[in-house]
Amino acid sequence: MLKKRIELKKRIENKSRRVRQEAGKKNPELIQEPVTIEAAKVVDETFLFGNNQDLDEEERFDEFSEVYENKKVPKIMLTTATRPSRHIFELMKEIQTMIPNSFYYSRRKFGLKEICKYASNRDYTTLLVFRERLKAPFQLIVVNLPYGPTAIFKITSTKLAKEIYFGGNPTDHTPELI
């Protein structure tokens, strides 16, 4: 009985499909376009295509251009949140070996704004603040000095070099973040 019901259902579906195809051949407006990602995409009006004078002028005054053109050497200040544990200090040592020209300063009881002013007065280009929760690193705040932008990243898991089986030693080349 179940087999007969399934076959009947298939026959009805096939018949309705044939009827729709015949109707579409007679009237092409009834044919529906398949919904694809490309067809459903809405063009963003704020996107600039081709050459744009305003965009070219903005790129000439880019705050990162000196770093990308190797006119200015990045100088990075590392600090932690208040009352750090030994686990965050182990991570800071690893970061200092990976990133050249990075220096650690104790946070003490200073606020983030005060630290940013201190770092920008000493010609630092970037400030990295590592925060922890339950004695494990959980957040990284990256501030491009002197005016920003600021980004906050969540750290989900860390593994130090000594914890990696047959882990290698860092090289002396300058790392590139993409």
Image (cartoon, rainbow, N blue to C red):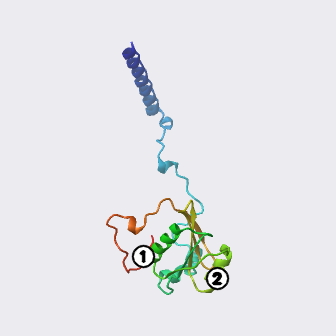
| Kind of residue at badge 2 | Tyr
Q: Nearer the viewer, residue 97 or 145?
A: 97
Q: Is 1 drawn above or below residue 9 in the view shown?
A: above
Q: CA distance from mark 2 to mark 1?
A: 26 Å
Residue at the (34%, 68%) spot, across then down: 167
Q: Which badge, 2 or 1, is on the more N-terminal residue?
A: 2
Q: Residue 148's quadrant in the figure?
A: bottom right
Q: Residue 142's quadrant in the figure?
A: bottom right
Which secondary structure lies at badge 1?
loop
Task: In the displayed orientation, state which residue is furthest to the front.
Answer: 86
On-image quarter of the C terminus: bottom left
- Residue 44 in the image: x percent, y percent? 57, 58
- Residue 40 in the image: x percent, y percent? 52, 48
Residue at the (58%, 67%) spot, across then down: 151
Q: Is 3 drawn above or below residue 119 in the view shown?
A: above
| Kind of residue at badge 1 | Pro
Task: In the displayed orientation, state which residue is furthest to the left.
Answer: 166
Q: Nearer the viewer, residue 14 or 107?
A: 107
Q: Which residue is mark 2?
A: 118
Camera-near label (2 vs 1) is 2
Q: Which residue is mark 1?
A: 175
- Residue 175 in the image: x percent, y percent? 42, 76
